[in-house]
Amino acid sequence: MHKLLSISVLLTSLFASHLAAQNTVPSLQHPLAAYHYSTPAAQVRSLDHISVRFVNPGAQPVMDVLVKAEIHEPGGQVVTLSRELDWVDAGADTLVMFPSYMPPQIAGDFTVVYSNSAYTSSVDTVQRKFAQSLYSGFASNNNTIIPGGVGLSDSAFIAADFTLQFGSLFYTGSNFTYWHPHVKFGIANTDEVYVPFDPTANIIAILLYDADPFDEGGIHFDTTWENLGVGLVGFGEYEIKGFEHEFILVPGYIENIMTSGDDLDLKPNHPYYISLYYNGLQAGAGKCVRFSKSSKEAYFDFPSTPLFAGQMIRDGWEEGTPVLEFHPEAFYDNTESPLSPDKYSISPNPASSSLQVTLDLDQPNATVVVSLINAQGRQLQYQQLQGFQNGVVVFDTRDMPAGMYLVRIATEEGRGVKKVMVGH
């Protein structure tokens, strides 16, 4: 059973150790402000966990310490939040939580400057930045791409069974309940991972998870992508085409796994993870995909960019923050439109020994691919059909563990995805 931690408890536990008094230790550490670096202006929400750690680096206690967070808004206004500490022992580490702050619904850069009255040298003033935009989406990266990308070494990738999955945490605001989302990301080493004429080897799965599927008011700090599968609400795929460049972001669509439509009814003021999954087994080169990156960011300082490579790593890569943007508005081209639900059916659901996918398309399609995928985005079985219009595709599910899976259908008439259960 997972240990569910509220944000406040988690913040307290992350930096609870006491530091030995030394003059080189800055008095303010680990400033937190927004939940991610970038937020759509239409999706602003109250920032209820603005905080900083006050560490008394002196050899004596200090009294009546005023700790401030000055928020410099894009229009030039400054909002000051403050807390007073009556007594802090030498070497003591204290979490300072500020009053809630509601950002104005405007675009621009925000800078939060943290200071205190006991120690006033330059090292004792720290900053945290975040941004709001009329057109950009949610993102933990800082909107600047730097060369090299992030990914595993080839040896670590092979040791992780040729799989890599990472995600980005975001919190919705209170203004939208109806979404047509897509993501943007970049690939830095297309020449190493692209396999010509083999679409199944070039797939990057896109998964959208509810981080609090039972509305318990927190996130599962010790969970894995597998355990988050119960909260999977959206799925999509991006096919590497061979022309991707790390400085040019590519879009990927997301579909509602319950309706196979392009709409998602996301909860307001709620945490979600957008995630990318890559399996290099089919490619056969033993090369790990490297995703475009910004400099290292930590929004929020609990797992804002978790990475799974054989084990869950809570703070992603040390070499940078992967660029992964979640946009509320729709994006589609001709090959990525939803497949009408009346063109296919899936039975039985739940399945025990087999699963049947019945297709009734408008005309013969040059290529139809039907895939069976697990909740982490891994393709378990697939059938590729040539010159196909109607008929039944059967998957053997006898040896599959009971649980939730996805059926993914890719045709020239559109794409569909449906949530199915396997039970024995």
Image: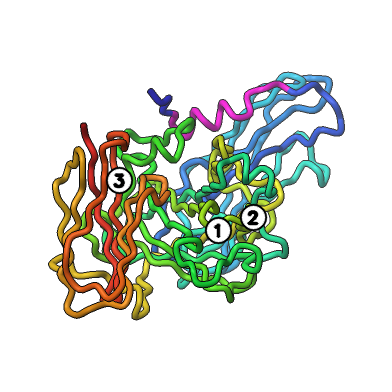
Of pointers 3 and 2, the one earlier in the residue sequence = 2
Task: Return the residue at label 1.
Answer: 283
Above or below residue 21? Residue 147 is below
Q: Residue at x 58, y 40 (%)?
A: 160
**Which callout, 3 or 2, points to the residue nearer the camera?**
2
**Of residues 229 and 84, the one drawn nearer to the viewer in this rendering:** 229
**Which callout, 1 or 2, points to the residue nearer the camera?**
1
Q: Residue at x 30, y 46 (%)?
A: 405
**Which callout, 1 or 3, points to the residue nearer the camera?**
1
Quadrant assignment for the C terminus: top left
- Residue 229 % position (x, y): 35, 41
Identify the magenta region.
5-18
Q: What is the three-letter code of the residue carrying label 1?
A: Ala
Q: What is the three-letter code of the residue carrying label 3?
A: Tyr
Of pointers 1 and 3, the one earlier in the residue sequence = 1
Q: Secondary structure at mark 3?
A: strand
- Whether tag 1 and tag 2 are in contact, CB under 8 A, the answer is yes
- Residue 5 % position (x, y): 44, 29
- The colour scheme is rainbow
Task: Return the residue at label 3.
Answer: 405
Above or below residue 157? Residue 131 is below
Quadrant assignment for the N terminus: top left
Task: Return the residue at label 2.
Answer: 287
Above or below residue 78? Residue 50 is above
